[in-house]
Image (cartoon, grey):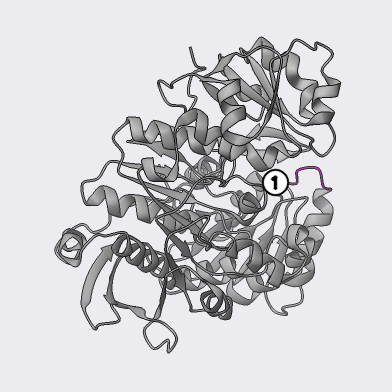
Amino acid sequence: MHKARALRPLSTSPKTLSSLAFALGLQHRGQDVSVTGVALASSAVQAGDLFVAVRGVNRHGSEFWPDALASGAVAVFTDEEGWAALEDSSVPILVAPDPRALVGAVSAEIYGTHPDSVPTILGVTGTNGKTSTAFLLEAIMRGLGARTALSTTALRQVNGENFPSTLTTPEAPDTHAMIARAREEGVSAIAVEISAQALNKNRMDQVVCDVAGFTNLSHDHLEDFQTMDNYLEAKAALFTVEKAREAVVCVDTTWGQKLASKVTIPCTTLGRRGSASAQWSWDIVDVQGESTTFVLESPEGAKGEIVVPLTGDHMVANAALATVMVIRSGVTWEELAVLGPGTKGIPVFIPGRMERVSGLRGPQVYVDAGRSADAYEQTLSALRTSTSGSLIMVCGTSGNRDATKRPIMGRTAAEHADVVIITDDDPRREDPTVIREGLLEGARAIHGVPVHEIPDPSEAIRFAVSLAQEGDTILWSGPGSQDYRDIGGVKIPYSAREQARQALQDAGWGKTS
């Protein structure tokens, strides 16, 4: 039996090690056993699994074989170093020079998830908007009556059943297991959020997107990629014949234009109306409360209107990208009419992305997952249009990540908010004081804007609420819907949503849910 909540297919056809070795050109040593699953972490092992043991930053995965064996693993896939480290020479094993480069192929063989035998896959990458666009893709297809699956930073879901998410893009065994489960459940469309790191680390190997979308590129993750050009190159790996059949690229930024110019698979471009380089265009035609109607125009001049329960140019751009991706996957204008004017629109809720946690009384309070200057600017600009009073920002950012972006983030916060409160977020293994100093450096460079430093995030949101009145807006950016804080490498349960709601209630604004 599988562990509870494992996102795995309910049944698989056993594969022998000898058949896997023959199919993929691997070395097979020891007994010829059958496997029914595959796992890269010993904690993820299910009974009957092939355990993949590769070299990590500090240790080799072969050290965890006893744990994997105790959880039910029956064989190991490793390199020569791993094989030499296993004291028991009778262990059934597959060997390759670089197992990580082949784990996607092994997973596809075990789960039978070859590109020609799986549901439609719609993948999206970019710096900001990936999660939102993936949720929108899933919601559009569900709104059209399809059974769907979703894989994002915030949530993984198959046919309405939710599963935990720990990585923006799961490791290859988990991705293939999810695809297999989705196929079992009769899912016809899967929306997948894809990070640059995932592409670099082979997590999408042997997965081919029917349509791949690109949102934007902005300063982020330079701790991994050093330069923006390298960062774009990592994203561009998705838009190759090995990873996608067709591309839809937003060209509202120069990075999008640069990507579109080099894509070799069929490519459709999209931009806001007036963009000379875009084939498709979008424009907002009406905003009612927290709902927006936008119009899409095709290269041939055909137009259609879509309603989405979101506001802000950046969110509408995400919705437009998702809609064009769905159209390029084969959906017609006529089918999309069920999401147009006179309807409730795209049935989407995006947790932790401009998510309102306040009630009808008092200040508006939103939580958001943005941890970049571009995300700050887009979200604050959107909230400014619905704020009659002051705009207060609470923000922190992650440790052990690109430190060069922090002063830019702080400066952007102070340029667009009336009050800035710098707090802790996910320090991980970095000194939180150093993280705050980076944000404070930028924020304090903008004169005339009050900047406060409150390390405890619970105290920070309470202080923000104490400053706010009816008509004011508070944006707490960073934690979004995350249900923990990573402190010293330990995940401590924590919910920004609940802390914000409690702060409002304690301030006398009543219950918010």
Compared with 322, 78 (above or below) is above
The region drawn magenta spans 426-430
Asked if residue 273 lies left or right of residue 463, the reply is left
Q: Where does the image place residue 338, in percent across and percent down from the top left?
A: 16, 58
Q: Is residue 166 visible?
A: no
Asked if residue 153 lies left or right of residue 450, the reply is left
Instruction: Assign a secondary structure to mark 1.
Output: loop
Q: Where does the image place residue 378, in percent across and percent down from the top left?
A: 52, 70
The residue nearer to you, when weighing 240 against 171, is 240
Residue picked out by circle 1: 426
Q: Where does the image place residue 115, in percent across and percent down from the top left?
A: 43, 45
Residue 319: quarter of image:
bottom left
Compared with 44, 281 (above or below) is below
Asked if residue 16 lies left or right of residue 438, the reply is left
The residue nearer to you, when weighing 220 against 96, is 96
Main SS class of the magenta portion in the image:
loop
